[in-house]
Amino acid sequence: MKLNTTKHRHSGTRRRPITRPIAAALLGATLLTGCQQANQSLFIGDMSSAYNREIWWMSVWAIVLSIIIFVGVSYALFYTINKFREDKHDAPPAQFHGNNRLEVILVAVPVVIVFGLSILTVRSMAILNPTPAQATKIDVLGKQFWWNFAYPETTSDAGGVVTNGNEIIMPTKQPVALTITSGDVIHGFWAPNIGGQRAAMPAVKKTWQVDTDRAGVYQGNCSQLCGGSHANMRYKVVALDQDRYNTTLAAMKAYRAPEPAPGSAEARGYALFMQGKASTQAVACAACHRVQGTPAAGAAGPDLSFFGTRRTLGAGMWEAMTAAQWTEPKAKEQLHEWIKHSPAVKPGSLMPSYDGSEYLSKGQKLKGGVLTDAEIDDISAYLRSLKLPEEADYWSGTPINGANASGGTQ
Ligand code: CUA
């Protein structure tokens, strides 16, 4: 019996090395495809950002100092081993107690090293932490599982602060002060191209300065495990040169959602959006979403004011990298599926299902109302009509970071 157990154990250990490389290969493949999609350089930061340049040079100095320390310690170690190794022909080594000079050196040297390294950190903090008064201010709100980006200094002509869901528009070549908070659990704001990452915490507002010199569309992710759709809590950073930024923000300020023509699909969609459908208990979209220039002022979900100009859906779960892709039948299908039963396509989504199935809201199982496919298409048509004027289409012509040349923007 005993022999058998040993044998089993042995065969078990022999099998493990085979499964390990397979698992590693699978993980590697997943990571590689992940890199391709995310279009991010994780090795060296994006040097177009002064924030990243500061961190990079601080790291270079820290690494240089570490190499000097490593060489020094290695030299001392090998010197000592060599000099004081046992010599059988020699007399026993000198016996003594304590060595004041050595002890002072052993305390003083590490103190100097730690002090030197901490100067680097403190210096970078002093450079990066203060937010200049003239910085563009953007309020960032993270919620399960989406983002709202508000421009507190820009009140729209239609009332309310200009806000965009899941796509943050910022100017280039100047500091941008993000004031980050969360509406529920802790999230992480992480857009590596414009700076490092910061926690978004409920009931806490933290201001943080980011920047980039180069116009472009950059990837942002939630970097703090926050629930079932943590990985589906993405956003786009759209950095525009000053003129385009001003044009876009001015258009956002002046924007009022277009009034649909009577009898059109958009008009039917508008009615459903605002009132829902009482006969089937379908909740109105307006209860949770805001659309600038309409009575819709919900704050439980992302702002939809400029939905038709956006090219991401479901907080970056689907994205169209060209204007054409956004109008393809596939994109329409995705939007249809999204409205019909968002919790079925995005785990943990707090949006109601409109296919009559159950969904979870604040820990409670609720039954969603029912909308027909035609009604859902009407709502889609209305959402797609929520467009900024052409000159304020912030995606148009903006290079997409990491995309190949043919994957242009138009
Ligand atoms: Cu929010 Cu992870």
Image (cartoon, rainbow, N blue to C red):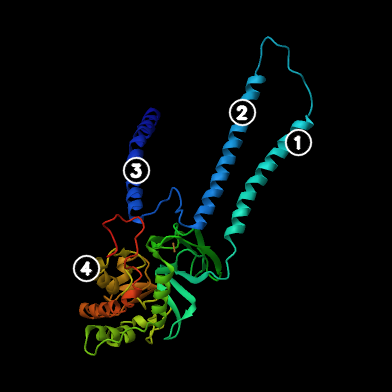
Q: Is mark 4 within 8 Å of ligand 1?
A: no
Upstream in sequence: badge 1 or badge 2: 2
**Crowding near the residue tagged with mark 2, few <14, some 14–19, many ≥20 C-alpha atoms within 10 Å:** few
Q: Secondary structure at mark 4?
A: loop
Relative vertical location of residue 158 with respect to residue 119 in this rendering, above or below? below
Upstream in sequence: badge 3 or badge 1: 3
Q: Position of residue 172 (x, y in %)?
A: 45, 64
- Report which residue position mark 1 lands on: 104
Mark 4 vs mark 3, CA separation in Å: 37 Å
Residue 272 appears in which quarter of the rendering? bottom left
Residue 274 appears in which quarter of the rendering? bottom left
Upstream in sequence: badge 1 or badge 4: 1
Q: Position of residue 372 (x, y in %)?
A: 22, 79
Contact, CB < 8 Å: mark 1 with mark 2? Answer: no
Mark 1 vs mark 2, CA separation in Å: 19 Å
Q: Is mark 1 within 8 Å of ligand 1?
A: no
Relative vertical location of residue 357 with respect to residue 130 in this rendering, above or below? below
Residue 251 appears in which quarter of the rendering? bottom left
Q: Quadrant where the N terminus lies?
A: top left
Q: Which mark is residue 75?
A: 2
Q: Quadrant where the C terminus lies?
A: bottom left
At 36% from the left and 36% from the top, the residue drawn is 16
Q: Secondary structure at mark 3?
A: helix
- Report which residue position mark 4 lands on: 328
Mark 4 vs mark 2, CA separation in Å: 66 Å
**Crowding near the residue tagged with mark 3, few <14, some 14–19, many ≥20 C-alpha atoms within 10 Å:** few
Amino acid under label 4?
Glu
Contact, CB < 8 Å: mark 4 with mark 2? Answer: no
- Report which residue position mark 3 lands on: 23
Amino acid under label 3?
Ala
Amino acid under label 2?
Tyr
